Amino acid sequence: MLQAVIFDMDGVICHTNPFHSIAFQEFFAKRDLYPTEEEFKDHMYGKNNSYILSHFLGRTVEGEELAKLEDEKESLFREIYKSKVEPISGFLPFFHDLKKESLPTAVGTSAPMANMELIIDKLGIQSHMESMLASEDVRKHKPDPEVYLKSAQNMGVAPENCLVFEDSYSGVSAALNAGMKVIGVLSSHTKEELPPCNLYITSYEGLEIPQLHSLFNK
C-alpha cells in the first residue's frame, strides 16, 4: 500500500534542465568545448556531475578536481536560476494534497545540496519534507538505489510502499532497483526513452491521490 512519496528534483519538481544546459554551455565554452543539445540529452540530464564532466572533458574527473569544477558549474546554475525558480504545473497543489492526506514526502536528488536548498526554500516546502537527500548524502549515485532506500529508511517506510516521481532513465532505474513504484514525469524524455513506469504524466494537473493508491492495488 502507498505510505510515502519521494520526488527527484530536476525535471520533476522544477523543469531546471534548460538552465543546467545554459550553465554547462558557459562552463564548457570557457574550455573551448561546445556540446550540442542532443549530447546534453544523452549525457547530462539525470546524470551526476562526475559522469558529465568526465564524459565531456574526455578524462576521469574525481576527488578535489571534481569538487572544484562541480562548484564552479553549480554556482553558475544557481546564479542563473535563483530568480526563475518555478515548479512544474500543478506541483504545489498536488504536493499540498499529499500533506492533507498525511503522506510522508521526500526529495532524493543527484544535485548538490545547495541546489536542493535553493529550490525547496524558494517553494516554501522544506518544513513539509520528512527527508531531503542530495548528492553529498550518498556514496553511490543513480541508477544505484541508495538515495531511494535511504529516503525510505528516513521516513520509516518499507521500499515497496513508496512511490517515486522521476524523469530520467537512471532515476527511474534507481527507483525500480529499490523495489518502488514509479511515475515517469515526461519533462525531458519520452515514454520510450524511459524504463517502464507504473504511470506517466506531463504535469501534475488533474493528478489525484486515489490514482496513486490504485497503482498499489494492481
Image (cartoon, helix red, strand yellow):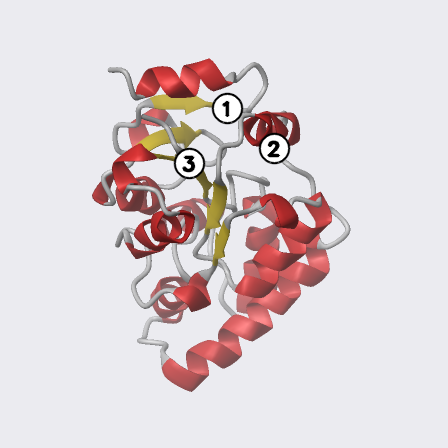
- Which quarter of the figure has residue 13? top right
Q: Is residue 209 above or below residue 148?
A: above
Q: Which residue, given by chain and number where applicable, does mark 2 sit on?
A: 88
Q: Which mark is residue 136?
A: none
The mark nearer the N terminus, 2 or 3, is 3
Residue 34, can we see it?
yes
Task: Name the residue type under label 2.
Answer: Ile
Q: Secondary structure at mark 3?
A: strand
Mark in front: 1 vs 3 = 3
Given the image, on which type of amino acid does mark 3 rest? Ala
Q: Where does the image place residue 115, in percent across and percent down from the top left?
A: 59, 59
Crowdedness near tag 3: few (<14), some (14–19) or many (≥20) residues, C-alpha within 10 Å: many
- Give the side of residue 135 with respect to residue 176, left or right: right
**Which three-letter amino acid code belongs to the residue tagged 1?**
Thr
Residue behind mark 1: 202
Q: Which mark is residue 4?
A: 3
Q: CA distance from mark 2 to mark 1?
A: 9 Å
Q: In whole angstroms, how far apart are the C-alphas of marks 1 and 3?
A: 21 Å
